[in-house]
Amino acid sequence: MTKRDPFKYFKTSPEIIRLAVMLYVRFPLSLRNVEDLLHERGIDISHESVRFWWNRFGPMFASEIRMKRAERLRSGPQWYWHLDEMFVKINGERHYLWRAVDQEGEVLESYVTKTRDKKAALKFLKKTMKRYGRPHVFVTDKLRSYSAALREVGAVDRQETGRWLNNRAENSHLPFRRRERAMQRFRRMRSLQMFASVHASVFNHFNSERSFSPRANFKKNRAAALDEWRQLGAA
């Protein structure tokens, strides 16, 4: 069965659409910043076009990336998951963005709730384990909701808490915080959930941990990630 071309009725080339979505999601740029950067390359578009493209194609690209990476992660052992929640304000009201990160810094799941009780933690855990399986160790902070939720799923003996143990999750919040400031916060839970999911997938795709590999290997990984990005959504 032939795959439907998602760019069929768009006058702009798929290459430009992919570039605009990548710039907006990956880097802390505003819609007008992306418009200006593309204008310097001789591409004349409106910032509203960038908004439409990211809303239309961002989730699709992220889903394609997530599907490939989830298959790879499920096939190997899951040693450590670092679980943490961060505070996000929506129209002045505090919400919680739950995030799961593996031992290599891969963002596994992002989930937005209004509370951070046992019910929210349990839903977040079940959603993550359904996609990736169960790890050997859950590293969390001392929030009691985690232990209650882990007891519910029969994994409380796998929980580890302690000072500095969860730095991996704390550090993984930084790219999202920079992007959040550039967007001047969020106005709806739905938009926060969508952007957090898309941002996590794009961050995972281009995150090659340059400080842990020689320059030559980093350049190869970066080129491979860009080549794979240019194939997203291809019919």
Image: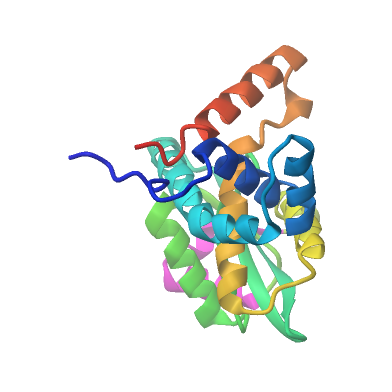
Q: Is residue 35 magenta?
A: no
Above-or-below relation of 83 to 113: above
Residue drawn where x is 22% and y is 39% of the image = 2
Q: Is residue 151 magenta?
A: yes
Residue drawn where x is 74% and y is 49% of the image = 34
Q: How is the image coloured?
A: rainbow
Q: Which residues are magenta?
A: 144-161
Count up the numbered dots: 0
Above-or-below relation of 85 to 233: below
**Which quadrant does the C terminus fall into?**
top left
In the image, 45 versus 119, the foreground residue is: 45
Q: Residue furthest left?
A: 1
Q: Residue furthest top?
A: 216
Residue 174 shows in this picture: no
Above-or-below relation of 109 to 225: below
Q: Position of residue 189 (x, y in %)?
A: 60, 77
Residue 46 shows in this picture: yes
Q: Position of residue 120 (x, y in %)?
A: 53, 78
Q: Position of residue 90 (x, y in %)?
A: 71, 80
In the image, 131 versus 165, the foreground residue is: 131
Image side of residue 127 versus residue 222, left or right: left
Which image quarter: residue 204? top right
Residue drawn where x is 75% and y is 16% of the image = 214
